[in-house]
Image (cartoon, helix red, strand yellow):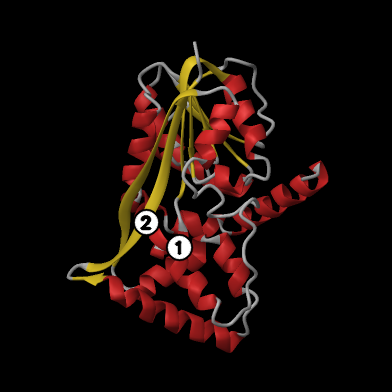
Amino acid sequence: MTQQSSQQIIEGQRQDWNRVAGGWEKWDRFFDEQMAFLNHRLVADARLRAGMQVLDLGSGTGYPALLGAQTVGPSGSVIGLDLAEQMLAAARRKAKALGLANVTFRTGDATALPFEANSFDAVTSRFCLMFLPEIPKAAAEIARVLKPGSWVVAAVWSSPDKNPYLMIPINVIKQFLDLPQPDPTAPGIFRLAKPGDLAGMLQQAGFTNLSEEEFVADVRFASGEEYYASLTDIAAPIQNLLAKLSDQQKIDARGRTITSVDQYRQSDGIALPIAVRMVAARKPR
């Protein structure tokens, strides 16, 4: 992949995530409650403790950087990095509301980290690395900025068949559009879904003590309507596909999506399965 094409991808992603920043802030409390377990898992696997200097990649509106800042306390600090300035603006507002003075957010590219070597005691990342056009380059950068003996931990999406939460609207849209088979090496939601993909790249970057687990859970909604509204507000890739439909097709797609999620109805609402690949690795001492 040429540098120019990588930069074009990155710029397109920046525009996409800035566009949905308002949706993320709108649904912030809901997803903070629904996805809290992932943030805690990342913080735990990164072995965070008081006084650490932490880097969070792809922080978006603040996850898991804000929990990391609470964990390392006033004697530590967290830097959250993301492409989208409008997402980070929301993160800063949340940090201020929480009274967290030890976390800062800045725009940047994970494949060219603006930090000195051996600067951080841990690196965390939630749903970021699979969107990068040059993941091995990012892995090398993470290795460079981490202190020896420190951990990186990342959450990426597992395979499509185990993620109805993500796939239901995509499968519905396929009923209206002839979508090409995705390039398994191109940036995208499921780029690192295959077992061993991310772990292998981290190993190539020099990391050891690798661990990988498929972490299964669900995301709960009061109704199919709530699910559809949330996803179309926050999911930039889904928005891009829906934009290709006619107005009537959009109405039909909404109805079919809501009908499809009803198969996951339980007594207390809709429970949509998700599967997340959790990968942790250590920089050798």
On screen, residue 86 above or below 72: below
- Secondary element at tag 1: helix
The location of residue 87, given as percent across then percent down, is 56, 48
Q: Residue at x 52, y 47 (%)?
A: 90
Q: Are the residues at dot 2 and dot 1 in contact (C-beta closer than 8 Å)? A: yes
| Residue identifier under label 2 | 274
Q: Is residue 3 left or right of residue 41?
A: right
| Residue identifier under label 1 | 166
Q: Is residue 81 left or right of residue 49?
A: right
Quadrant placement of the N terminus:
top right
- Secondary element at tag 2: strand
The location of residue 40, given as percent across then percent down, is 33, 37
The location of residue 243, given as percent across then percent down, is 63, 74
Q: Residue at x 40, y 65 (%)?
A: 164
Of residues 187 and 116, which is closer to you in this image? 187
Q: Name the N-terminal-most of marks 2 and 1.
A: 1
Residue 110 appears anywhere in the view:
no
Q: CA distance from mark 2 to mark 1?
A: 8 Å
Of residues 177 and 258, which is closer to you in this image? 177
Amino acid bearing label 2: Ile
Q: Is residue 268 left or right of residue 122?
A: left
